[in-house]
Image (spheres, rainbow, N blue to C red):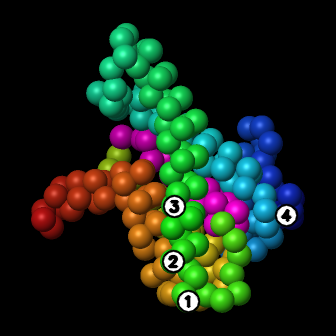
Amino acid sequence: MSELLDSTVGRPRGPAGFARAWLTVILHPRRFFREAVVPGEQAPGLLFAMAVVAVAETSRLLLVADAVPIDVGPAALSAAFWLGAAVLLVTPATLHLVAALQTVLLVPFVSDRGGVSETVQVLGYATAPCALAGLPSPELRALVTIWGFVLLALGIGEVHGPRFEPAAALAAVPGAIVFGYGFRGFAAVETVLRQWYVI
């Protein structure tokens, strides 16, 4: 297990590096965020999030009917266009905007905090469970998006300093954007509650 806790796992290169980082942030999130998030180095967290989105969207496109939200011609072309846009355009833009918002929300409450680059990494790595969000199970999607939010709060606490409860409160809006809307967690939770006749 010691090799999984090597601080270099926070810099995934290739499928093996991604798998090691994914497994480590899932199994040992506090230590991962403490050791693998590096000031001024956004790329690893960004690439990690892009890989997670690629896995999630690919599985969704393959397993969920009518999953492609755009039509640019043949179904395969539309799916490829959407996957490329989601991974290469939507993910980097959203991650940086939400990281900037998260940093602004931290300013009044945390004086000795990390910068935007650290927040980008925390957000990126917190998406780890959402690699499974594309599978056609609202229960699973609800679980992994909630898990992702918990990882975000843990990461904010480890990198920026607040305890878990304040970190969770400060991460509520960014978490809602990324996990509630981006990974469709709100829709999944609503579907589960309807299936259980709660609403």
Q: Are marks 3 and 4 in contact (CB under 8 Å)?
A: no
The numbered mark at residue 109 is 1
- Mark closer to the chain start, 3 or 4: 4
The answer to the question of whether label 1 and label 2 lie on touching residues, with beta carbons closer than 8 A, is yes
Question: Is 58 situated above or below 162?
Answer: above
- Residue 146 seen from this side: no
Quadrant of the snapshot with the N terminus: bottom right
> Is residue 84 shown in magenta?
no
Question: Which contiguous range is marked in magenta?
Answer: 117-136
Label 4, on which residue?
7
Q: Residues within 10 Å of mark 2 (few under 14, many from 20)?
A: some
Residue in view at x 36 percent, y 11 percent: 73
Q: Position of residue 2 (x, y in %)?
A: 86, 64
Q: Is residue 44 left or right of residue 183?
A: right
The answer to whether residue 37 of the structure is visible from this angle is: yes
Residue depth check, mark 1 versus mark 4: number of the one nearer the observer: 1
Q: Amino acid at mark 4?
A: Ser
* Type of amino acid at the residue the image marks with label 2: Leu
Looking at the image, is mark 3 or mark 4 nearer the viewer?
A: 3
Question: Mark 2 = which residue?
Answer: 105
Image point (42%, 35%), residue name: 60
Quick one: SS at disc 1?
loop
Query: Which numbered disc, 2 or 4, marks the residue closer to the eye?
Result: 2
**Residue drawn at 43 percent across, 23 percent down:** 79
3D distance between C-alphas at marks 2 and 4: 28 Å
What residue sits right under mark 3 in the picture?
Answer: 98
- Mark 2 residue element: helix
The image shows a total of numbered marks equal to 4
How far apart are the alpha carbons under marks 3 and 4? Answer: 25 Å
